[in-house]
Amino acid sequence: MDDGPPPNGARRRPRPGLAVLSDLGLTADGICNTRVFGAFGDEPGREGDDEPGAVLAGTRRGKALVLNATMEPLCVVPARRAVVLVLAAKADVLHANGHRFRSERLEIDAPSVVRLRRYVHVPYRRRAALSRRGVFIRDEHTCQYCGVPAENVDHVLPRSRGGAHEWENVVAACRRCNSRKKDQTPAEARMALTRAPYAPRAAFWLVVAVGTVDPEWQTYLGDVLSAG
């Protein structure tokens, strides 16, 4: 559902991950307004829902992994958007999440993983964008110097000394190690990394976006946490 124009004429930013669906004629607004939702009646959505329409037994906030026709992960969308793709014959359900969409005229499994029937071209991204959250996920929220829970990120070669802000030079660190190292290299501070930092594969952005990964998605994400 369109929430109305943004204030002061500002342009609304596209929702992450959904831009790739525009090739199917299903943009973010198109998905919300498609006639497919008519099959589920006209129940208004609850506050905070992504769009109105379907009644999902048990939960209204299921997520679904969308795969390209080549099985490449594309994005994560609300389960109801995945239902739209399925009912519009744009995608097939590979896994359901155990819940059901129900209406007077229709009942369908809530998707957990769907695969597009037609290939959608996506600009190739060589690596995932660096972010604090991404560093914590890659390093398993563990200090890469001493192994305790991490609270900060550290540039292995300090930026003040020419160190780059890139995956290969940033690690998760605890406050104690971060303070001890200061503006030094690990060798100068007599500290050692438990492993060398690396850039994850391009699809790592998806893991960062959702935070936690459904076990059924692991098969399709593969070694997304490994070096790109």
Image (tube, grey):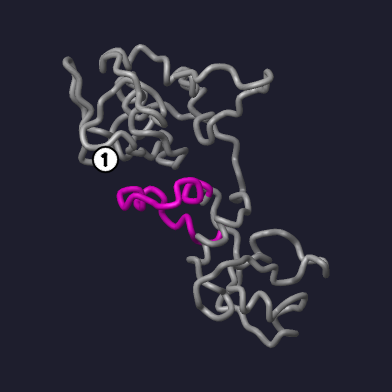
What residue is at 70 percent from the left and 68 percent from the top?
A: 155
Residue 153 point in image, percent of width and height = 63, 65
What residue is at 46 percent from the left and 38 percent from the top?
A: 75
Which contiguous range is marked in magenta? 205-228
Residue furthest to the bottom in view is: 190
What residue is at 75 percent from the left and 85 percent from the top?
A: 188
Residue 68 point in image, percent of width and height = 43, 35
What residue is at 57 percent from the left and 60 percent from the top?
A: 135
Is residue 23 highlighted in magenta?
A: no
In-image side of 47 versus 178 (left or right) = left
Query: As displayed, is residue 158 above or below residue 76?
Result: below
Residue furthest to the right in view is: 161
Q: How many marks?
A: 1
- Say which of 149 and 129 sits in front: 149
Disc 1 crowd rating (10 Å Cα; few below 14, some 14-19, many 20+) is some
Is residue 222 highlighted in magenta?
A: yes
Residue 14 point in image, percent of width and height = 57, 28
- From the image, tell me which residue sits under label 1: 95
Disc 1 residue type (three-letter)? His
In-image side of 9 versus 115 (left or right) = right
Query: As displayed, is residue 8 above or below residue 170?
Result: above
